[in-house]
Amino acid sequence: MSVGTAWDDPDLAAVLRAPARKRLRQGLALLAESRGFPELRALRVRVLARGLTGRLKELAAAPSDDPDAMLLLGTTRIHYAWNIRGGAYAEHVKRERFQRFWAELQHAQAPLLRAADLLPPDPVPWDQLQRYAMGMQLEREELDRVWHEVLWRAPSLYSAHCTRVQAISAKWYGSDEEAAAFAEEVVDRAAPGDPVVAAAAAVHFEIAGRRIEDMSRCEAVLRSHFRDPAVTDLMVRAADRWLRSPMPHPRTPEAHHMFGAAFHFAGEEDRARHHLRQTDRRMPELLPWSVASLTPARYYAKTRAALGV
């Protein structure tokens, strides 16, 4: 299984296959082509940053009047810093590691704000500034301000909604109740055909995941949560709203993973089967399978086999 590749963008895939010495130049050209297409731009900068942490010095030397270079520089610095911190809950991260994390992360803000100044309609720098604000543990008021900067420019930006799910979860700035209300809100205001409704599934994986205290019981906890009639009904309403007239979208495979997993745990096997048939061997970077198992790729493969996909 290929983790972190649950997306559709042939041009981005081609750049990732290019020799390392060409990847930065080609990646910047790809970002330039994505101006005005925020869903593609948000995907591209996140994926490119993941592979360019070793080129930070070269990126830092890029012209400060290049919005694509500034966006990529800030995003790469965020990714590099989070690699230092790791994905554990804050209480499990040692102080020394936090200090190194913050020392690196603080350098991400300036290039992202510069990118935002250079291309005022672009929501993607603001999307990345959400991740910066969370990592720097800024006040909730500032995080909300950044979120509204995104919404003003792109009310349904998929990646921004995924980050917002994290921000308002109980482990960060919010609560289960606030997150659940956000899931309902996303579904209610989404345009028919927009996969952003998969953020509702992400919310409920966050809520259920927080209740797992023993990994040997994770399946039982997930089944109990997603079989709650209110949660099942929301998943059905969200997926049906998307599938009514699905629009082309680079995050379509990831959305199918979200709903496929949600329906699997809800016991809605036909629905789960339909969604997982669209995903093949590409897996998201994080949710949903990482909640279900310490070996998510293996668990996903087992689920596909059990469903006959």
Image: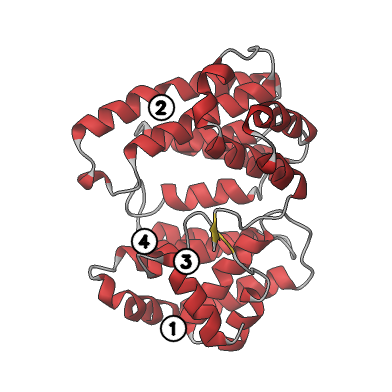
20 or 163, nearer to the observer? 20
Question: Where is mark 2, residue-wise?
Answer: 105
Could you tell me how far apart the alpha carbons at marks 3 and 4 are, in whole angstroms?
27 Å
Question: Where is mark 4, residue-wise?
Answer: 176
Q: Circle 1 sits in a helix, a strand or a loop, which is it?
A: loop
Q: Are marks 2 and 3 in contact (CB under 8 Å)?
A: no
Name the residue at 59% across, 87% down.
308
Q: Going from the N terminus, do you reach mark 4 or mark 1 first? A: 4
Question: Amino acid under label 2?
Answer: Leu
Q: Going from the N terminus, do you reach mark 2 or mark 1 first? A: 2
Question: Where is mark 3, residue-wise?
Answer: 297
Q: Which quarter of the figure has residue 27?
A: top right
Location of the N terminus (image quadrant) = bottom right
Q: Circle 2 sits in a helix, a strand or a loop, which is it?
A: helix
Name the residue at 62% across, 82% down.
309
Question: Amino acid under label 3?
Answer: Ala
Label at residue 227: 1
Local crowd at mark 3 within 10 Å, few (<14), some, or many (≥20)?
A: some
Local crowd at mark 1 within 10 Å, few (<14), some, or many (≥20)?
A: some
